[in-house]
């Protein structure tokens, strides 16, 4: 066959019609198109470059979609999408109404399980394998997990369960010595020891050359080699847990992968394949700096990623600068991250204060309880964690921190809508799930300057507290170097008006200010979802006929609900409109586009207010609006 192979590979079934010798060309074409697509849309880049050959081999050997492939985290599935009927949709990747950057069951029958949070694949694939056995199906089930994801406790729970079962499950460890940040922990050290087999392999090839003219010696060496391999393999941690271990094998040799996978496919019981890959493979700039190319925005493949010139600090940068400044002032400050050093703005802190910086791996549960233990010894732990990832440490938040009323500060990055990463990463639920916990406090800064001051306020509090802030930049409020806190639990009026008061929790304050100034309404920067400033609520309620609450979070159980509860306790009967994200999972897409879609831009909020109180338009609108 001449020309491109991808032009007619519309499904894995067609891929399986190719000769094995054609697979390297398929991988080469896929990698070239992957670079083209991601440079146009942005997205997870290095991780996908590293799994091209593995993806081709899996779909070539296994009868997908009947056989199940479960990709851990799911940020390594772009080639999987390209091979499973979504090649022409790759230009819509992570855009509104386009395909997701992660596997989604309702997007394709080839997406066996929706993933985006780490370390779930083995549990899901084990459930599928046992489910298949229960119904008498011969389908195969495969979990593909990265070395970073294997640092989470959930992965070990699943390995422990699977190793004691008799089901036919294959766990593939994609070992690229990287997660997002550099790898940490004892497991990483153990995998490095297994990787020393590379040096053994090189020595073996040299030995073959020396012994090829001495058949008896060669046969003896071969016998010793097999015994040595069996000894090594049967003493891996994975063998001890009940798996048959194979590896390490080259994850970029697609033909060798096919041979290995075919052999494993015929075996019974739990199997473990250790595959070694290179993050960023095939694009030199990503190979040299896989962290920078982990999730880039659009870029020119010939030039590479050019750091954007920022006119405004991001909230993450504000936090990172504050963390270093406060650490200089207070030697008791220690900082913890669950494998998100870069994303949470902690690179500088890790360099300046290495003995007070703790990356615990992708282990949110451990991070929370570890912080609690540090607090018990008089230290002041700051846990920098994405809002969506705090969900994974919820029991620990309640039982180990809040119940004991320990002074642990949680800096919740990526609160609110997050854009292209979609519903799995949206930080919409932290107000609701933390507000119901006794002893917890919740802070909602509205801009970068207020964020810095409220970070100090949170840190100085002698109890558990979360401070939530969004991804990216805000309005560009000037940020001073002060470490002075703001008054605890106090809101402030930002615009005085009448009739209706807009109570804003967080960055939606700025939409509220524009509307308040236009229609002569009161605008209150609430700052706190818990404790609420009930004195402010009571004061404003006396002179207004209605409240509008605004939050970049779920309205179910959120800050607006807290206002209603407070009004009920104070016997205040006032008409209240609660605005935020309704009881549904959000889409993925551009942040501004999504804010408009969910009617939380100025126009959307304005229309909802005028629908509830139409006389405001007549009383306050400009004459040209009345004429229209």
Image (cartoon, grey):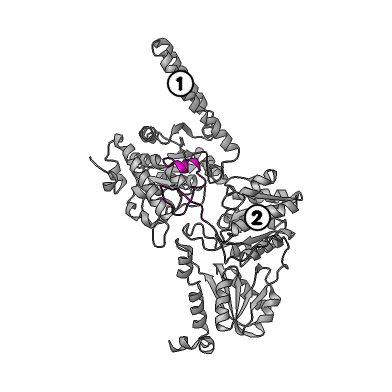
Give the main secondary structure of the magenta stretch: loop
* Residue furthest out toward the right: 378
Q: Which residues are magenta?
A: 280-308
Q: Is residue 388 above or below residue 236?
A: below
In which image quadrant can residue 391 be found? bottom right
Q: Is residue 27 above or below residue 37?
A: above
Q: Which label belongs to residue 399?
A: none
Q: Residue furthest left?
A: 1
Task: Evaluate if marks 2 and 1 touch, with contact meaning CB atoms under 8 Å apart.
Answer: no
Residue where numbered disc 2 is placed: 321
Look at 35% across and 40% down and name the residue there.
Answer: 28
- Label 2 secondary element: helix
Quadrant where the image shows the N terminus: top left
Residue under numbered circle 1: 204
Instruction: Indicate which disc, 2 or 1, sits on the residue closer to the N terminus.
Output: 1
Q: Which residue is depicted at the point 39% across and 62% down?
A: 97
Horizontal side of residue 113 vs 487, given as left or right: left
- Could you give the CA–CA distance between mark 2 and mark 1, rounded to whole angstroms? 52 Å
Which of pointers 2 and 1 indicates the residue nearer the eye? 2
Looking at the rendered structure, the secondary structure element under dot 1 is helix
Q: In the rendered structure, does residue 440 fall within the stretch colored magenta?
A: no
Q: Percent from the top left, x then y, of residue 7?
A: 27, 47
Of residue 186 and residue 339, the one placed in the foreground of this image is 339
């Amino acid at each position: 066959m001449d020309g491109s192979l991808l032009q007619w590979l519309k499904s894995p079934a067609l891929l399986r019609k190719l000769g094995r010798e054609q697979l390297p060309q398929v991988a080469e074409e896929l990698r070239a198109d992957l670079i083209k697509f991601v440079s146009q849309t942005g997205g997870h880049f290095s991780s996908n470059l590293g799994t091209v050959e593995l993806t081709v081999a899996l779909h070539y050997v296994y009868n997908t979609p009947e056989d199940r492939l479960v990709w851990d985290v799911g940020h390594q599935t772009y080639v999987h999408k390209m091979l499973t009927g979504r090649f022409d949709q790759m230009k819509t990747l992570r855009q509104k109404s386009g395909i997701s950057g992660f596997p989604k069951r309702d997007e394709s029958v080839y997406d066996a399980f929706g993933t985006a949070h780490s370390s779930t694949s083995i549990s899901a694939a084990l459930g599928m394998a046992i489910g298949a056995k229960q119904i008498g199906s011969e389908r195969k089930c495969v979990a593909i997990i990265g070395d970073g994801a294997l640092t989470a406790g959930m992965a070990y729970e699943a390995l422990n369960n699977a190793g004691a079962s008799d089901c036919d499950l294959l766990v593939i460890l994609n070992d690229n010595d990287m997660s997002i940040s550099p790898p940490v922990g004892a497991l990483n050290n153990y995998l490095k020891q297994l990787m020393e087999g590379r040096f053994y392999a090189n020595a073996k090839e040299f030995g073959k050359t020396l012994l090829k003219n001495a058949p008896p010696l060669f046969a003896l060496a071969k016998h010793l080699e097999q015994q040595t391999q069996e000894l090594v393999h049967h003493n891996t941690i994975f063998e001890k847990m009940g798996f048959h271990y194979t590896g390490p094998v080259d994850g970029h040799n697609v033909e060798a992968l096919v041979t290995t996978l075919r052999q494993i496919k015929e075996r019974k019981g739990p199997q473990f394949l250790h595959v070694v890959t290179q993050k960023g493979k095939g694009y030199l700039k990503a190979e040299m700096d896989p962290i920078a190319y982990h999730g880039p925005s659009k870029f020119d493949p010939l030039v590479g990623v050019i750091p954007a010139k920022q006119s405004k600090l991001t909230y993450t940068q504000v936090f990172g600068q504050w963390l270093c400044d406060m650490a200089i002032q207070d030697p008791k400050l220690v900082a913890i991250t669950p494998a998100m050093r870069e994303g949470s703005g902690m690179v500088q802190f890790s360099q300046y204060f290495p003995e007070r910086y703790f990356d615990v791996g992708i282990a949110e549960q451990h991070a929370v309880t570890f912080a609690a233990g540090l607090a018990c010894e008089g230290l002041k732990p700051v846990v920098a964690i994405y809002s969506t990832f705090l969900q994974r440490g919820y029991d620990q938040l309640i039982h180990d921190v809040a119940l004991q009323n320990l002074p642990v500060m949680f800096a919740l990055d990526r609160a609110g809508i997050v854009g292209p990463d979609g519903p799995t990463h949206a930080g919409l639920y932290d107000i609701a799930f933390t507000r119901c916990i006794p002893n917890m406090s919740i802070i909602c800064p509205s801009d970068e300057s207020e964020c810095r001051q409220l970070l100090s306020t949170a840190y100085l509090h002698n109890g558990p507290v979360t401070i939530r802030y969004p991804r990216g930049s805000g309005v560009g409020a000037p940020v001073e170097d002060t470490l002075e806190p703001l008054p605890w639990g106090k809101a402030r009026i930002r615009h005085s008006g009448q009739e209706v008061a807009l109570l804003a929790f967080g960055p939606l304050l700025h939409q509220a200010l524009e509307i308040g100034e236009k229609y002569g309404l009161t605008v209150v920067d609430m700052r706190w979802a818990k404790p609420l400033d009930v004195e402010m609520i009571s004061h404003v309620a006396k002179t207004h006929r209605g409240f509008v609450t605004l939050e970049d979070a779920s309205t179910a159980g959120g800050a607006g609900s807290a206002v209603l509860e407070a009004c009920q306790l104070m016997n205040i009967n006032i008409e209240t409109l609660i605005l935020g994200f309704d009881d549904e999972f959000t889409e993925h897409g551009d942040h501004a586009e999504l804010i408009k879609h969910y009617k939380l831009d100025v126009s959307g909020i304005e229309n909802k207010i005028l629908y509830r109180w139409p006389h405001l338009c007549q009383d306050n609108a400009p004459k040209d609006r009345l004429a229209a």
